Image (cartoon, helix red, strand yellow):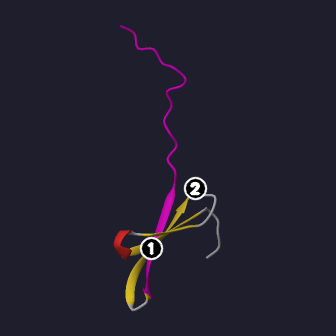
Amino acid sequence: MDVMSFGFFRAKKVQKQTSQKQSFDVAGRTLALTITENARAKRLTLRIQPGGRGLKVTVPPHISD
């Protein structure tokens, strides 16, 4: 049996994501801050983790610190 190849079966491109971690004191609590650069992001997004355990910021590529 021959194996046929189809042009529409292609490997997906892997999106690069880089992360850095910091911590901040907020109202007497130390919260972990994770900054993630996502190639698909179009805007800055700030998320608070459930229970207020930490903060996560997603940024588009090439944004200044």
Q: Left or right of 22: which side holds 46?
A: right
In the displayed structure, would residue 8 be above or below residue 57? above
Q: Main secondary structure of the magenta part?
A: loop
Q: Which mark is residue 39?
A: 2
Q: From the image, which quarter does the N terminus lie in?
A: top left
The structure residue drawn at horizontal position 41% and vertical position 14%, both measured from the top left corner, is: 3
Whole-angstrom CA distance, mark 2 to mark 1, is 20 Å
Give the residue type at disc 2.
Ala
Out of 27 and 35, give the one closest to the viewer: 27
Out of 59 and 29, give the one closest to the viewer: 29
| Residue 45 in picture, x, y percent from top left | 55, 66
In the displayed structure, would residue 41 be above or below residue 2? below
| Residue 5 in picture, x, y percent from top left | 48, 18
Q: Which mark is residue 55?
A: 1
Out of 7 and 59, give the one closest to the viewer: 59
Query: Regarding mark 1 in the picture, which secondary structure is present there?
Result: strand
Give the residue type at disc 1.
Leu
**Which range is magenta?**
1-25
Q: Say whether disc 2 or disc 1 marks the residue closer to the N-terminus.
A: 2
Check residue 49 for magenta coloring: no
The structure residue drawn at horizontal position 63% and vertical position 62%, both measured from the top left corner, is: 43
In the displayed structure, would residue 3 be above or below residue 42? above
The structure residue drawn at horizontal position 40% and vertical position 69%, both measured from the top left corner, is: 49
